[in-house]
Amino acid sequence: MNIEQILTTTIQQAVATLYNTEIDTNSIQIQETRKEFDGDKTIVVFPFLKISKKSPEQTAAELGEYLQANVSEIASYNVIKGFLNISISTNYWIDVLQNAALQGANYGKKPVTEKSPTVMVEYSSPNTNKPLHLGHIRNNLLGFAIAQILEANGNRVIKANLINDRGIHICKSMIAWQLYGNGETPQSSGTKGDHLVGKYYVAFDKQYKAEIETLMKQNMSEDEAKNAAPIMQQAREMLVKWEQGDTETIALWARMNNWVYDGFGKTYSRMGVAFDKMYYESQTYLLGKQIVMDGLAKGVLYKKDDNSIWADLTAEGLDHKLLLRPDGTSVYMTQDIGTAIERFKEFGDMQELIYVVGNEQNYHFQVLALILKKLGYAWADKIYHMSYGMVELPEGKMKSREGTVVDADDLMEDMLQDSIAISQELGKLSGLSPAEAAEIHEMIAQAALKYFILKVEPRKTMLFNPQESIDFNGNTGPFIQYTHARICSVLRKAADQGIYPPAQLPKIQCAPLEIELIKTIARYGEAIALAGAEHAPSHVANYVYDLVKLFNQFYHEHSILNEPNEEQKLLRLALAKQTATIVASAMGLLGIRVPERM
């Protein structure tokens, strides 16, 4: 048991013994002692005053006496009004460090067993009409990190990607390529496949706007012009042909999608994200359409005069939701219905189906759960929308149609070049071979990007600043990496001298900073649990920053290898090693590698 559990159990015993009353754990409040007072844990005694029928000070003193007499881990206590401050013995904190060292990389994590609950995390979910951009980067990093964190909380996690490979947006790129492509391919132009298809998506939008402007000059309203624009009519006709299985349309669709998949694969690989299951909208939308038709037959859904099919959600305080267009083609909601049903058929014991999708889709997922419930699927309550804010730039929002996005590949390459320039300026990697330096430059660049994004609470809109992200000081990925490399250097120097952390740590007095560092190490499991419960990788990111910040303070104030007291030296070496282990573990949960040299 940890110290909170020990204290909770003993407080229950104390109240029963002293005041002849049974209490449950909900009435017990244990907090971290404020820095201006002596102690490690503070017990709030006000909830016990009705039971004790005594003053706050007297009640706290009686509880303190009982706890000190019955808990060997308590060194002393003091009373400040209605608060009982408990000081934990140094031996207890050394045992905490000992236990952490024994568990190694598994420390703070729960094991995954055959009985572990299953959770699916869907992230990325790109459209095959454009390359990944900065917004997709946040999506992928959040999805991959929360999947890792949920697994560290003892869940069987399935990382899923739903490729949005059909629909009107896909047809826009296809039509534009037919009109303006002149047979261009990734091989003929040397262009990455997703970039090539994205170019034609932008070309479609440019032509579409020009046609709308022309039609509006002919006295059409804007809505009429948008509907009548020839290039949009061609795209709609292509979508109908696709859903009817037209051979030529399907062949072009498959060809262009394969270009995109090849491009996506390269981006995912560099970003360091992966998936266990790949789903394709083109393979799930038909099930969605069938489910919608079944819902219509049962009277759960309704049909309008134009043959479109809708869900009436007014009883739930919402509006009416389109599920099938008048021409019979499906919408996003249709395929999401089919995909969700398919997943729960395949993994029927799922505890949670998490969709990592931007906050502009909050309404969509609220509606998805309501419609599935209306259709009779009790597991609809297990759907969770992990909503996140958009990533903005100093210039404002990004727009894919207008080609004003920050391309993911370009951004990662720019980050690499910044990493090289800053590392060379600071002389961080002098003495390494070109291959070693290249690998570490890439690690630094990825850490700068990932950590800057993941340290922000997901629901918040964030402003991305590449220059701030790659700083070697402050709350950044490179600063955390550098601390890890610094500890590894100390451990190498110790090994060269034949000094290693002992299997059994000495029970000696510790400096306040050493105790504070062990207490922070002890909170690693809490940070993982909180990040999983709140679906927020930022808790792990901010925890590891607090840990390295404290370690650096300890490192500057206390010598490790030059400490004359041999037992103190060994304890500090063990403390440094466990800090490095947790840094590597925590950053690994965020999908970030840490170098041993920098």
Image: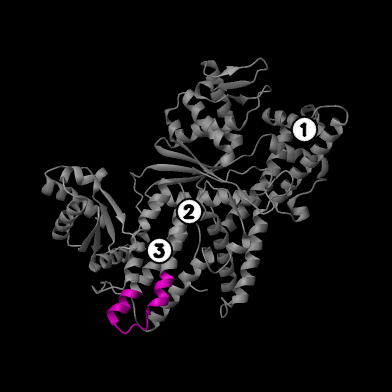
Residue at the location (15% across, 49% down)? Answer: 13
The magenta segment is 551-572
**Looking at the image, is 340 positioned above or below residue 48?**
above
Residue 128, horizontal then vertical, whole percent: 66, 43
Residue type beneath disc 2: Ser
User: Disc 2 and disc 1: Cα gap in Å?
Assistant: 42 Å
Residue type beneath disc 3: Ile
Residue 533, horizontal then vertical, whole percent: 40, 46
Give the SS element for disc 1. helix
Mark with earlier residue (1, 3): 1
Residue type beneath disc 1: Met
Q: Which mark is residue 538?
A: 2
Residue 146, horizontal then vertical, whole percent: 47, 49
Residue at the location (40% across, 66% down)? Answer: 581
How many discs mark residues in the rendered view?
A: 3
Q: Mark 1 — residue?
A: 232
The reply, left or right, for residue 364 in relation to residue 23 is: right
Observer-nearest of 246 and 456: 456
**Looking at the image, is 345 positioned above or below residue 143?**
above
Give the SS element for disc 2. helix
Observer-nearest of 201 and 344: 201
User: Disc 2 and disc 3: Cα gap in Å?
Assistant: 16 Å
